[in-house]
Amino acid sequence: MTEATSTAGVFRLPNNFPQDLPTPKFKIGDRVCWHPLPAQDFGIITGLEYAPAEHLQGWSWKYVVWLDPQSPSHEWTQQDSAWEDDLTLYTPEPATEEQSYEPA
């Protein structure tokens, strides 16, 4: 049996691993943002792993997110990671007339 050690104890691989893995909520290339707000970071999924999650007392999907240049944290880091329950799909709001780009 394969085990992962954490500061809180030992996690064992889920039964019937990997056949019974839950389907990831997000896939590589999905645009996501953190929720609930006030976190305002957003970006694109570039990687994922199924890992022990101490706060969930089990295993969960964890994602690598390449931050958008307009994301507030991009000023000091280009990527971050997040658990599946901390993300939601990101759909930018349509540009208003004041925000839209008009060629000269």
Image: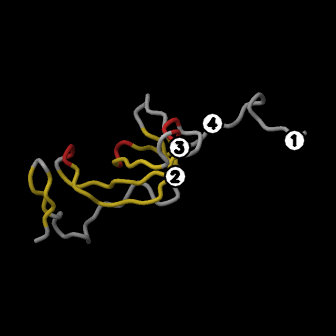
Q: Secondary structure at mark 2?
A: strand
18 vs 73, nearest the viewer = 73
Q: Nearer the viewer, mark 4 or mark 1?
A: 1
Amino acid marked by disc 1: Pro
Q: Are marks 2 and 4 in contact (CB under 8 Å)?
A: no
Q: Which mark is residue 93?
A: 4
Q: Secondary structure at mark 1?
A: loop
Which of the two labelled residues, at mark 2 and mark 4, occupies the earlier sequence position?
A: 2
Residue at 35% from the left image edge and 49% from the top image edge: 84
Residue at 25% from the left image edge and 67% from the top image edge: 20
44 vs 25, nearest the viewer = 44
Location of residue 40 in the rendering, given as x and y in whole percent from the top left corner? 48, 34
Which of the two labelled residues, at mark 4 and mark 1, occupies the earlier sequence position?
A: 4
Disc 1 residue crowd, few under 14, some 14–19, many 20+, Cα 10 Å: few
Which of the two labelled residues, at mark 3 and mark 1, occupies the earlier sequence position?
A: 3
Q: Are marks 3 and 1 in contact (CB under 8 Å)?
A: no
Amino acid marked by disc 2: Ile
Name the residue tied to disc 2: 44
Which of the two labelled residues, at mark 3 and mark 2, occupies the earlier sequence position?
A: 2
Image position of 27 (left or right of 71):
left
Name the residue tied to disc 1: 103
